[in-house]
Image: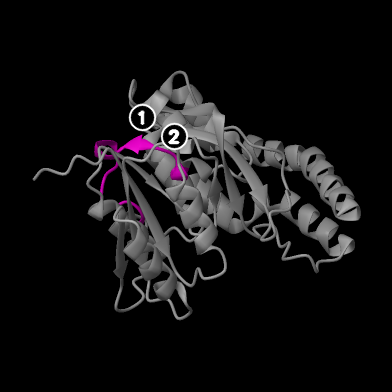
């Protein structure tokens, strides 16, 4: 019988015991129910396998695979994509949380045009303490304009639309393992390649909580001083060698030599913009987090 699943969700996971229950409950509780959830356990050494097997017994939409050895994060992302049978696809991280209408709202966009659809991105630490204002991702218009906007934009949160909804036929495989020399931000490169062919469209009706410690804020124990240091260290990160190499890799993806020369000259503009944006944005967010801590 032909598989009629409309949406495939791919969840690569390694040692996700702390948050995977919350993520699974969030996905399985979606208002849109016609999906398969493909979990690839990358040879976890904690209790991830037991949790996934427990959920798979209770819900037939879950397809659980445990890798015999750790195949690496990039290969694990590609694995769940290759296993997907749905017309539409989205990756899901094991420690994220989604609004109940996330899939339903994104389908309103991708069913009518070939694009990546994504909602609000809400950055929090492990304890769901917000560390950023909600971020929107809207890269629309001409190909050159949307590429320029993505290229210049501050890196924080820029890769989140990787977890958006897209027609599966629009994603080439392999995806992440095709960037073996990229040590920083392969998700940015993935999105920049897709922007050559389609728009990334913001759906304001839904959101995703992106949990992490991507700016060095771990748990509830970091002092306010360390918090401020972490933020201001992040302000000047655009001048790192990895980020410069990363910018150059973006340029190789562009279609014409004129565009490549133009974006080469934009590297100083990109760095200046990101630092100046950080000086205002990061300061505001650091103050907000400290205030929220004092009220908790």
Taking the image as drawn, is residue 138 in sight?
no
Query: Is 237 placed left or right of 230 in the picture?
Result: left
Q: Which mark is residue 256?
A: 1
Q: Is residue 109 above or below residue 51?
A: above
- Decide: few, some or many residues near mark 2? Use Cα within 10 Å; few <14, some 14-19, many ≥20: some
Give the x, y percent position of residue 167. Answer: 30, 35
Q: Position of residue 62 (x, y in %)?
A: 32, 57
- Please give the name of the residue rendered at 70% of the width and 59% of the height, measured from the top-left corner: 127
Furthest-bottom residue in view?
Answer: 45
**Along the viewing direction, whichever of 249 and 286 lies nearer the viewer:** 286
Q: Based on the displayed image, in which of its 4 quarters is residue 57 positioned? A: bottom left
**Residue 115 rendering spot, x and y as whole percentages:** 38, 28
Q: Nearer the viewer, residue 9 or 113?
A: 9
Q: Residue at x 53, y 34 (%)?
A: 119
Marks 1/2: CA distance?
A: 6 Å
Marks 1 & 2, CB-CB < 8 Å contact: yes
Q: Closer to the camera, 145 or 28?
A: 28
Q: Secondary structure under badge 1?
A: loop
Left or right, residue 140 beside residue 238? left
Label drawn at residue 260: 2
Q: Residues within 10 Å of mark 1 (few under 14, many from 20)?
A: few
Write down the region rendered in magenta: 162-176
Residue 170 drawn in magenta: yes
Image location (x, y in percent) of residue 229 = 82, 59
Judge whether residue 229 is colored magenta. no
Q: Residue 111, located in which quarter of the rendered image?
A: top left
Dot label at residue 206: none
């Amino acid at each position: 019988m032909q598989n009629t699943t409309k949406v495939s969700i791919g969840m690569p996971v390694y040692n996700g015991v702390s948050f995977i229950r919350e993520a699974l409950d969030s996905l399985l509780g979606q208002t849109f129910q016609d999906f398969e959830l493909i979990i690839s356990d990358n040879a976890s050494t904690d209790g991830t396998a037991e949790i996934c097997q427990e959920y798979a017994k209770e819900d037939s939409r879950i397809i659980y695979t445990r890798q015999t050895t750790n195949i690496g994060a990039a290969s694990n992302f590609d694995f769940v994509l290759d296993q997907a049978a749905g017309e539409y696809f989205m990756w899901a991280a094991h420690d994220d949380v989604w609004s109940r209408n996330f899939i339903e709202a994104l389908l309103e966009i991708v069913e009518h045009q070939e694009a990546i659809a994504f909602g609000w991105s809400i950055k929090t630490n492990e304890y769901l303490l917000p560390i950023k204002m909600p971020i929107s991702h809207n890269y629309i218009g001409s190909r050159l304009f949307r590429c320029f906007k993505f290229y210049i934009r501050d890196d924080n949160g820029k890769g989140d639309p990787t977890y958006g909804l897209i027609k599966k036929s629009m994603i080439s495989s392999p995806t992440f393992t095709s960037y073996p020399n990229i040590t920083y931000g392969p998700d940015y490169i993935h999105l920049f390649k897709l922007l050559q062919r389609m728009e990334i469209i913001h759906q304001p009706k839904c959101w995703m909580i992106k949990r992490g410690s991507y700016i060095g804020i771990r748990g509830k124990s970091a002092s306010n001083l360390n918090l401020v240091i972490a933020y201001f260290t992040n302000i000047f990160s655009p001048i790192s060698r990895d980020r410069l190499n990363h910018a150059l890799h973006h340029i190789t993806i562009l279609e014409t030599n004129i565009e490549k020369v133009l974006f080469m000259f934009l590297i100083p503009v990109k760095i200046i913009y990101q630092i100046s944006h950080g000086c205002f944005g990061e300061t505001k967010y650091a103050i907000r987090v400290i205030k929220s801590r004092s009220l908790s």
